[in-house]
Structures are given as structure tokens and as C-alpha cells.
Image (cartoon, helix red, strand yellow):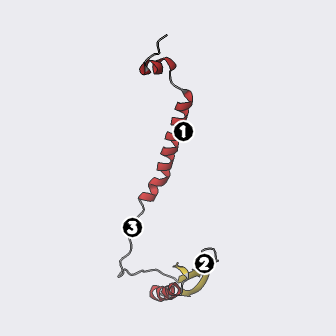
Amino acid sequence: MLKPLAGERIKQKGPNHKELSMLRSFALATVAALGLLTPATFTSTAQASPGHHYYHRGCYHVYYRSGCRGPWRCAGEYGSHERADRVLRSYRVRGFECYLR
């Protein structure tokens, strides 16, 4: 008995359902991963220029914490953005993580 050629063996066997299922799963996982990563590639890198003035009514709060898991604490409430920014920078120089709100 002669052995069939490689191309003929594939025609005789037909598609393997396990391989198709794995291929579908891989394709679906790839599409899902790309869908989740796409918004991260379009983040804005725009930043305010140093001369930008903030016109905000009310007050500014400076929050700080000493570690990544520490609680946020309010350093104070300031009437001007410039004063709040100075306090914020003084906390950053001392090694605190802080933000202005």
C-alpha cells in the first residue's frame, strides 16, 4: 500500500475542530488585549505653559502623603494659586507626594 501525499492527507482528514477552537480563542484574546491597550496609546501629553494663570474662585487645597499607601492629608487652604503652588513645591522638595486641588 502506498502512502498518500502530504496535500492529500490534509484533504482526507478535514479541519481539526480543536485547532480551530484554539485559533479562535487566540484571535479573540488578541483583539481584546488590543482593545484594552489602545486608549493608553492616545493619552494626551499637553501641559500648561509656565506663564498660564489660573482664574479660579474660591480656595486651593494642598494634599500630601508620605508613602504610596499613606493617607492623604490636607496641608492647608490657600486663597491664591501662587501661594498654594509654593507650598506644594515645598512639600515635594521634602519628599512628599502631593497634589493641588
Q: Give the residue displayed 61% in from the left and 78% down from the top.
A: 72
Mark 3 or 1: the one toward you: 1
Q: Is residue 95 above or below residue 39?
A: below
Tell me the element at label 2.
loop
Badge 3 density bin: few <14, some 14–19, many ≥20, Cα 10 Å: few
Residue 19 falls left or right of residue 48? right
Residue underneath mark 2: 67
Q: Give the residue displayed 44% in from the left and 18% down from the top.
A: 8
Residue underneath mark 1: 25
The tag on residue 45 is 3
Q: Is residue 35 above or below residue 75?
A: above
Residue 21 falls left or right of residue 69? left
Is there CB contact under 8 Å for labels 3 and 1? no
Badge 1 density bin: few <14, some 14–19, many ≥20, Cα 10 Å: few
- N-terminal-most mark, 3 or 1: 1
Badge 2 density bin: few <14, some 14–19, many ≥20, Cα 10 Å: few
Q: Is residue 97 above or below residue 25?
A: below
Instruction: State how far apart marks 3 and 1 are (Cα).
Output: 35 Å
Mark 3 or 2: the one toward you: 2
- Which residue type carries mark 1? Ser
Q: Nearer the viewer, residue 89 or 53?
A: 89
Residue 95: image quadrant is bottom right
Residue 18: image quadrant is top right
Instruction: State how far apart marks 3 and 2 are (Cα).
Output: 26 Å
Tell me the element at label 3.
loop
- Which residue type carries mark 3? Thr
Residue 54, image x and y in percent?
Answer: 42, 80
Instruction: State how far apart marks 2 and 1 are (Cα).
Output: 41 Å
Residue 49 falls left or right of residue 29? left
